[in-house]
Image: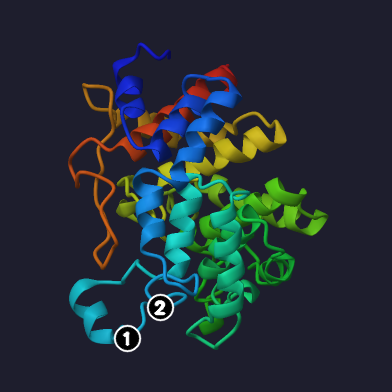
Amino acid sequence: MTQSDPVIEWLLDSDPAIRWQAMRDLTDAPQSLWLAERARVETEGWGAKLLSFQDRDGQWAGGAFLPAGFGPEEWHEHGQPWTATTFCLSQLREFGLDPSCARAKRTVELIGVNSRWEEGGQPYWQGEIEECINGRTVADGAYFGIDVSAIVDRLIGERLEDGGWNCERINGSVRSSFASTINVLEGLLEYEKAIGGTPASRQARATGEEFLLERNLFRRLGTGEPADEQFLRFLHPNRWRYDILRALDYFRASAILTGADPDPRLGEAIDYLRSRRSADGTWPLDWSTEGRVWFEIDDGPGKPSRWITLKAMRVLKWWDARAPMPA
């Protein structure tokens, strides 16, 4: 794949949040070039637009997990809202806002001072009680330079016997879920990128990965049937939800960090990903979540998605370069 590829050109003709990642992951552009493009996320396009909605106290929509004044009626009628602080931080991380820029540093500082979780009033960077939320808080905190080791230790202690996590553990669940596990794995990976992790966090990440790999990323361990047909439908932004592309992109990032070869058990998901490519070389957005957002960043379900296409192309590029040849 080169810059003359029309799909790559389509990705480059986009927002800085897409463009810098396509430059880095698909065209192998020099670091100086993609870093310069990444710096534009703060002042242009989606990144700047999302930052423009930030409250004076550093939060978004007046809350940590929920917008201020939000009631259960809206959730019932329109779905979970996505405008509060936690989802905005995760989106800025996905966009690639430079964590060393003054705006990012000031943001995480203000959130640490002013934001409290609705569940129990805990300071934001101390984490909540739910594994899915804490996994994303670890990912965001580690990315933006916050010490999240206490939350990491908590997550390590909340692992279930099958190696993964479930945010319903507190309600008695003893089996891990795909969604909870990927949220925690992404957090532990970001923590490892930031400070190298700890022996305990690396071991926890390994067991969580094994939970997904044993199930070929989407199958029930007992029956082999798909655990949820939604896992095979591509979503963006994922928020807390799981699909196999999210998992594949995680395993790619994990392997790049550690130097590991792709696990052959990813092969079925890779084949499915290839099968979903449209004739024009792009991948569609299959669905999106309901609920309040600041603005849309895709053209809608059924249409080509730059985000899905970017992730799919970099996963396949990594797999095709490193995957073991079949016997």
Label pair 2/1, CB-CB below 8 angstroms: yes
The answer to whether residue 72 is above or below residue 66 is below
Picture residue at 66% right of the left edge, 68% below the top:
155
The residue at which mark 2 appears reads as 62
The answer to whether residue 25 is above or below residue 193 is above
The residue at which mark 1 appears reads as 69
Closer to the N terminus: mark 2 or mark 1?
Answer: 2
Picture residue at 56% right of the left edge, 36% below the top:
252
Residue 217 visible here? no
Q: Quadrant of residue 309?
A: top left
**Residue 280 location (% of width, % of height):** 22, 21
The residue under label 2 is which amino acid type?
Gly
Looking at this view, is 69 or 199 the one in front? 69
Quadrant of the rendering where the C terminus is positioned: top right
Q: Is 71 left or right of 216, judged from the image as shown?
A: left
Image colouring? rainbow
Looking at this view, is 271 or 240 the one in front? 240
Q: Residues within 10 Å of mark 2 (few under 14, many from 20)?
A: many
Picture residue at 48% right of the left edge, 19% below the top:
27
Secondary structure of the residue carrying tag 1 is loop
**Residue 134 location (% of width, % of height):** 57, 68
Picture residue at 31% right of the left edge, 36% below the top:
306
The answer to whether residue 263 is above or below residue 82 is above
**Residue 21 location (% of width, % of height):** 47, 33
Q: Is 270 left or right of 229, judged from the image as shown?
A: right
